[in-house]
Image (tube, rainbow, N blue to C red):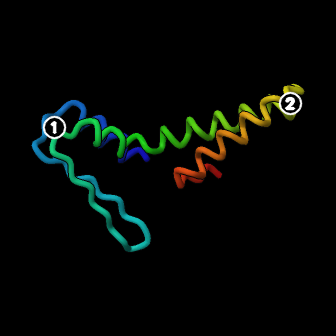
Amino acid sequence: MILLSGMISLAKTTKFNHLWRSIITNNMKATLEFNLPEEQDEFNYATNGFNYYHALYEMDQWLRSEYKYNGKEEMYEVREKLREIISENNVKIE
């Protein structure tokens, strides 16, 4: 995670025509290519994936706490709707 964080910081401070980001997992390699600055939004979406995941996870856990420990029963339905939306978008948060 530190390496990726450093790459993101480098990408934000340095001008690149092409940026290659490689992810190595189980002897497999995936490379994402972005033409910056034209594809800056796409680059941000791809490199902030963990942040998006973490925000959804935190919201899910907060809703759980609200109905389980604070007696706010209406939060159960809100959490179910959040989980439905997450599932429809093929995202797993657990």
Name the foreground residue: 54 vs 1: 54
User: In the rendered image, which residue does mark 1 sit on?
Assistant: 38
Amino acid type at mark 1: Glu
> The residue under label 2 is which amino acid type?
Glu
Mark 2, residue position = 73
Judge left or right: residue 72 versus residue 46. right
Indicate the secondary structure of the residue bearing disc 1: loop
Q: In the image shown, does 10 or 81 lie closer to the viewer?
A: 81
- Using the rendered view, name the quadrant where residue 62 is placed: top right
Q: Residue at x 32, y 40 (%)?
A: 6
Residue 12 vs residue 84, the one in the foreground? 84
Q: CA distance from mark 1 to mark 2?
A: 46 Å
- Residue plotted at (53% across, 43% down): 53
Question: Which residue, as the protein is rendered here, is positioned at the far bottom?
Answer: 27
**Image vertical order of residue 72 relative to residue 17, above or below:** above
The image shows residue 93 at horizontal and vertical percentages of: 61, 49
Choose mark 1 or mark 2, whichever is in front.
2
